Amino acid sequence: MINLAVRLETWDHPFRHFRGAGLLSARHLADLGATAPDEGLFRRIDTSTGEVRRRYRSSVLPISDNRTGITPDEIPLAAPWRELVTDLLSDEFTGWLRRETGVDTTGLHRRAEIYHHYDGDFEDLSVGKQHKRLSFALHTNEHWPADGGGEQECWSGPDRSAGPVSTMLPTGGTAWLYSPSPSSWHQMAPVSAGRGLVRRWVTMAFFE
C-alpha cells in the first residue's frame, strides 16, 4: 500500500526534518477513510490542564510495540488498515527509511500507533523525546480542508512571539519525519472546532 518509490524532501531549517507526498494513493485513502478503526478502541488523553511536562489532547490506539509485545493481530482492524500496518512493519519499509533519511532503525524499540484528533485537539510546543532516534507520521485523511487546522508546525525555538517557521497541512498521503534534537521544536496546531473533523494519522517511533 505505501508507495516506497517516493523520494523525501530534506528541510534543514529551522531543524533537519523530512517531508514526502504521495505515499498513499487516492483509492487507498478512500478505503482507509471508509474503514477507520472503531472509536471505542482508542484511549483518550488530555493533558491540557494542570502541571504537566507537555500539553496535548488526542485519542491513541497502539497497534504494534516490539518491547511490550503488542501486535496488530490482537486488534480488530479492517483489511485496508491491516495492509497499511503490515507495510509499516516490513523490512522494505525499514530499508526505505534508511535510504531516505540516513537513519538505521534496525533492532530498535519500535512503536506504531494510530492517532485521532477532534475539535480543538492539539499537541503543544516541544522538542520531542530525546531518546527517540526517528519519528515517522503519515496522514491518512482522504480530504482535509485548508482551514481545518491541525497543521504540523516547525519552530525555531520555544519563543512563541515569532510564530512557526514552516507549516505542513495534514494532507492525505503526506509524511513527516524527524530525529529529535535540542533544536527540534515543533507542535500540532489545534483542529478547527465545530466542524466534525477527525484528523487521522499513523505514526512509527524508533527509540534507543
Image (cartoon, rainbow, N blue to C red):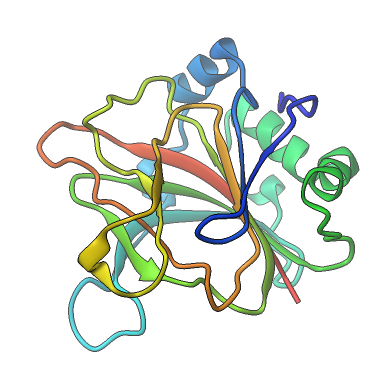
| Left or right placement of residue 48 versus residue 166 in this view | left
Residue at image coords 74%, 31%: 7
Residue at image coords 35%, 68%: 125
**Residue extending furthest toward the top:** 27
| Nearest the eye: 83 or 184 | 184
Residue at image coords 55%, 32%: 174
Q: Is residue 33 above or below residue 138?
A: above
Q: Is residue 31 above or below residue 94?
A: above
Q: Position of residue 110 (x, y in %)?
A: 73, 63
In the rendered image, the quadrant that contains the N terminus is top right
Quadrant position of residue 162: bottom left
Q: Is residue 183 above or below residue 106?
A: below
Q: Is residue 148 above or below residue 10?
A: above
Q: Position of residue 69 (x, y in %)?
A: 73, 66
| Left or right placement of residue 144 versus residue 27 in this view | left
| Nearest the eye: 194 or 65 | 194
| Nearest the eye: 103 or 80 | 103
Observer able to see residue 76: no
Observer able to see residue 56: yes
Q: Position of residue 193 (x, y in %)?
A: 13, 42
Residue at image coords 19%, 32%: 196
